[in-house]
Image (tube, rainbow, N blue to C red):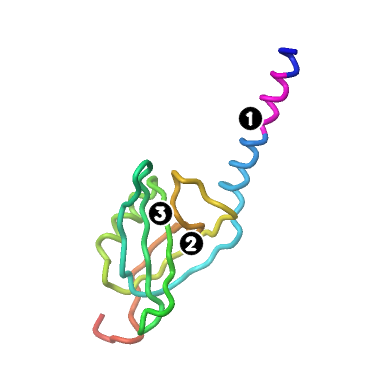
Amino acid sequence: MKKTLFYILGSIFLLYLAYFAFIYFVPYSEGTRTGELIKFSKKGVVSKTWEGEISQGISGAQIFQFSVLDSKKDVIQTLQENEGNYVKLTYKERYATFMIWGDTKYFIEKVEEARSPHFRDR
């Protein structure tokens, strides 16, 4: 009986590890988005995560929401410095997310300052 229980619990644990590895290492898509950074903040009750939004249109009708992992310190600092400016985000979209990672499936890998097509002085 104990041996069977051990095999069942071990199998469940291995399935969970395989699921976690798949979610972490296999991206659904990769790409870039450009827009005005309108929001970037650390939020959450139990687990604090970095969340942000960029506006991809003049009226703000198309909003791209994203998350940043805590390990990406340089990305976090660059986003904080460029709030209100036009930025180009390189992201990975994952199949799913975990509560400790963020609210969205889009995770930012790199940030670059971009030139606004609407305002030539920015």
Looking at the rendered image, the disc whose residue lies closer to the viewer, 2 or 1, is 1
Where residue 87 sits in the image (x, y, percent)?
35, 70
Say left or right for 118 vs 93: left
Where residue 105 sits in the image (x, y, percent)?
51, 57
Q: Quadrant of the C terminus?
A: bottom left
The secondary element bearing badge 2 is classed as: strand
Residue that badge 2 annotates: 91
**Sequence-wise, which precedes: disc 2 or disc 1?**
1
Local crowd size for mark 1, using a 10 Å CA cut-off: few (<14), some (14–19), many (≥20): few
Residue that badge 1 annotates: 13
The secondary element bearing badge 1 is classed as: helix
The magenta segment: 5-14
Say left or right for 41 vs 34: left
Where residue 102 sits in the image (x, y, percent)?
44, 51
Residue that badge 3 annotates: 68
Residue visible at 59% across and 48% down?
23
Dot 1 amino acid type: Phe
Say left or right for 64 vs 15: left
Q: Are marks 2 and 1 in contact (CB under 8 Å)?
A: no
For the residues labelled 3 and 2, the Cα–Cα distance comes to 9 Å
